[in-house]
Image: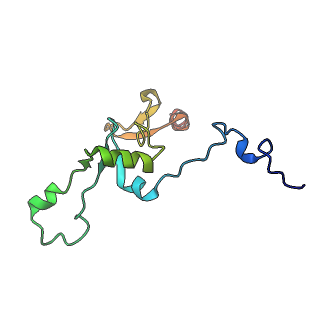
Amino acid sequence: RLFSSSSSTSWKSIPKSKAMRIKLRTHSGASKRFFLNGNGQFKRCQSGKQHLMLNKSNRNKRDLKPMVLISSRTQTRLLRRLLPYCGKRAGFRRIDIRECVWFKSGRFQGIGDSLRSAIIRAK
């Protein structure tokens, strides 16, 4: 027979290694709306700030400004499932101070070996 149905040759019987496992998809809508802070908590922007702001008081506008932490354990679990590769420090890039270049005013200019070598060449 051309196709065998025995369990020894079935592709389903082959154990999946870590490299062969299916990659999980990140939910693109959730990745744009929710951010992770340093403590591993999710934060989100508040709604009601995009338009129709003229008939809102200054206090209401000010109260809508800061991001809000998501305190619900159920929502946090759901977000962890929607954002599988969002680790504890996701979204934060570690910066090595030795590789940083700063303006004289104290503002951050850039990072990396190529930037540092360009500045050395300019001197």
Residue 72 located left or right of residue 61: right
Q: Position of residue 51 (x, y in %)?
A: 24, 70
Q: In the rendered view, does 31 fall on the left or right side of 118?
A: left
Q: Position of residue 111 (x, y in %)?
A: 47, 37
Q: Quadrant of residue 20?
A: top right
Q: Is residue 50 above or below residue 111?
A: below
Name the one closer to the observer, 35 or 14. 14
Q: Nearer the viewer, residue 102 or 36?
A: 36
Q: Identify the residue shown where x is 69% and y is 38%.
A: 15
Residue 13 location in percent, x, y?
72, 42
Judged left or right of residue 96, residue 55 is left
Q: Residue at x 35, y 37 (%)?
A: 40
Q: Residue at x 42, y 59 (%)?
A: 29
In the rendered image, the residue lying farthest to the front is 6
Which quarter shows the N terminus?
bottom right
Report the label total. 0
Q: Residue 78 at x, y = what percent?
A: 38, 49
In front: 90, or 62?
Answer: 90
Residue 42's quadrant in the figure? top left
Closer to the camera in the image, 120 or 112 = 112
Q: Does residue 67 sit above or below 93 in this rendering?
A: below
* 116 to 70, vertically: above or below: above
